[in-house]
Image (spheres, grey):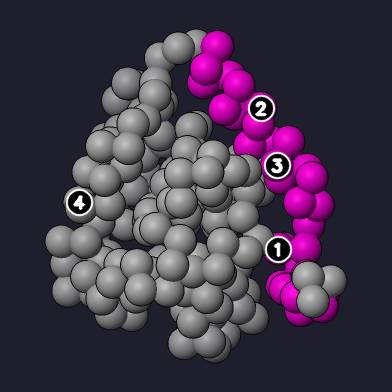
Amino acid sequence: SAAAAAAAAPKHLRASQTARAAAASEVLAAAKRKGAFSMTEDDKEQFYQRTVDGTGGFPRGIERDLITKFFGDGNDFGEGDHAAAFEKLKQCMASGSNCVGKDDSGWVWLVADQTKTRSMQLELWKAVPFGKRPLLLARQSQEAVDELFAKVDWAVVRRRLNEILGVRDAHGKKL
């Protein structure tokens, strides 16, 4: 049941879905007011294609540690069951569970965010993550998620930790 799945989710994913959705709505509304940035289906497809130009496999370094922290039993020191957390991420992306926002496009984003009061956070979004750090993008299906992780270029993902969609590029230049 949905209640059992919510109770089994890691604590950070049980945080108020309403609060996370409200924050996503605020970001989207601000982006629309500015009129400075939009993302078409072609833009999403290009983002995806740039992501799947690698050799795939298991992430290393900070990407692995963040996935383990937010989708498993990890901590701030990179400890935890990395393989189990990676599988949990893949399951959540394929099912579309524990996601912020919704735009009915069928895409699921792995998004990083960092505020002045929190360390780097990861979450899944079903809406374009304006003002956030989108890392990965896949269609919401097991086959599409498996394809993504079979071909992902983890160097591109690492570079994207520095980019903020609609705000700045990987070199810190404002868009």
Distance, label 1 to label 4, CA atoms, is 28 Å
Of pointers 2 and 4, the one earlier in the residue sequence: 2
Of pointers 4 and 3, the one earlier in the residue sequence: 3
- Range of residues picked out in magenta: 4-33
Residue visible at 71% across and 73% down in the picture:
10
Label 4, secondary structure: give it. helix
Label 2, secondary structure: give it. helix
Q: Are marks 1 and 4 in contact (CB under 8 Å)?
A: no
Of pointers 3 and 1, the one earlier in the residue sequence: 1
Of pointers 1 and 2, the one earlier in the residue sequence: 1
Q: The disc labelled 1 sits on which kind of residue?
A: Leu
Residue at the disc numbered 3: 21
Residue visible at 59% across and 43% down in the picture:
102
Q: Are marks 2 and 4 in contact (CB under 8 Å)?
A: no
Name the outermost residue toward the top.
34
Per the image, is 28 magenta? yes
Residue at the disc numbered 1: 13
Q: The disc labelled 2 sits on which kind of residue?
A: Glu
Residue at the disc numbered 4: 50
Q: Is residue 53 above or below residue 119?
A: below
Whether residue 65 is visible to the viewer of this picture, yes or no, is no
Q: Are marks 3 and 1 in contact (CB under 8 Å)?
A: no
Residue at the disc numbered 2: 26
Q: Quadrant of the N terminus?
A: bottom right
In the figure, is residue 29 to the left or right of 53? right
Badge 4: few (under 14), some or many (20 or more) residues near its Cα, within 10 Å?
some
